[in-house]
Image (cartoon, rainbow, N blue to C red):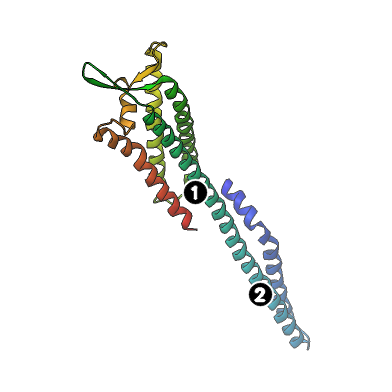
């Protein structure tokens, strides 16, 4: 039904020119076939003129149709590209908001020793403020995933799947961080002022300071690398227009 309505909207204007053309052709044929007088040449010329007029109308309609089709495709591509640019801007903002929060958490690490063992902690006040930023970024990425799944046709067929999967990986990594942090806060005494990274493995893996290289690589794999991949693919689609 939608296709029929779209075709009617786009090509319905051709109905009357087509009817007029058909009637003109029949009329020209009638003039020639019904001639029984000496004005045969006049009728022939009149029929030729009528046919020429019909051909001009048809040619004009075809040219107009081609131009309209080109303009529609151009407007559609411009609208799609604007959507891609918006997605790219929101994705970059979410990434750098997360990066900023991550860096603030790193710089607020407090290192102490207990029986010769190094303990790394972060003030809960800092964690609360920065996890609010991470929560906003996670919700933005989740929103992007839903939008891209709904409007996946905006991106090229060879890129759309990888773009969605990459952004989903970023969103899930932040969602796991938020889930772990909420659970940890519920189980922690409110009088405790610092969060021990030893009880927070996902955050420890996300922070570069004091983190084993293998753990840091995990965060790069599920958040940083998917970001760069999705950005490169979106840029490719933007530059195709």
Q: x and y percent of residue 40 in the render?
A: 75, 86
Give the residue pinned by disc 1: 154
Does residue 42 appear left or right of residue 211 in this picture?
A: right
Residue visible at 39% across and 27% down in the picture: 108
Which badge, 2 or 1, is on the more N-terminal residue? 2
Of the 4 image quadrants, the one containing the N terminus is top right
Labels 2 & 1 near each other (Cβ < 8 A)? no
Circle 1 Cα neighbour tier, 10 Å, few/some/many (<14 / 14–19 / ≥20): some
Does residue 141 appear left or right of residue 29 in this picture?
A: left
Give the residue pinned by disc 2: 55
Q: x and y percent of residue 2 in the render?
A: 58, 46
Q: x and y percent of residue 81 in the render?
A: 52, 52
Vertical comparison of 113 with 229: above or below: above
Count every numbered label the image shows and give the total: 2
Q: x and y percent of residue 44 in the render?
A: 72, 84
Does residue 31 appear left or right of residue 231 in this picture?
A: right
Instruction: State the residue in front, 241 or 35.
Output: 241
Instruction: State the residue in front, 93 or 142.
Output: 93
Q: Which mark is residue 137?
A: none
Instruction: State the residue in front, 224 or 150.
Output: 224
């Amino acid at each position: 039904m939608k296709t029929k309505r779209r075709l009617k909207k786009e090509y319905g204007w051709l109905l009357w020119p087509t009817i007029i053309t058909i009637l003109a052709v029949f009329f020209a044929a009638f003039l020639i076939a019904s001639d029984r007088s000496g004005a045969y040449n006049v009728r022939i010329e009149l029929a030729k003129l009528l046919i020429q007029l019909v051909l001009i109308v048809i040619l004009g309609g075809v040219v107009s149709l081609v131009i309209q089709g080109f303009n529609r495709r151009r407007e559609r591509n411009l609208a799609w590209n604007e959507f891609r640019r918006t997605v790219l801007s929101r994705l970059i903002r979410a990434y750098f908001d997360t990066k900023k929060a991550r860096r603030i958490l790193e710089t607020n690490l407090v290192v102490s020793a207990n029986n010769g063992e190094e303990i790394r902690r972060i003030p809960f006040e800092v964690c609360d403020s920065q996890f609010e930023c991470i929560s906003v970024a996670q919700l933005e990425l989740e929103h992007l995933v839903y939008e891209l799944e709904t409007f996946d046709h905006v991106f090229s067929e060879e890129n759309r799947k990888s773009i969605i999967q990459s952004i989903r990986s970023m969103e899930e990594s932040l969602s796991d961080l938020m889930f772990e942090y909420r659970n940890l806060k519920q189980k922690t005494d409110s009088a405790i002022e610092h969060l021990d990274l030893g009880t927070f493995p996902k955050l420890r893996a996300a922070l570069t300071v004091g983190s084993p290289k293998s753990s840091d690589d995990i965060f790069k794999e599920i958040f940083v690398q998917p970001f760069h991949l999705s950005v490169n693919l979106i840029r490719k689609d933007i530059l195709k227009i």
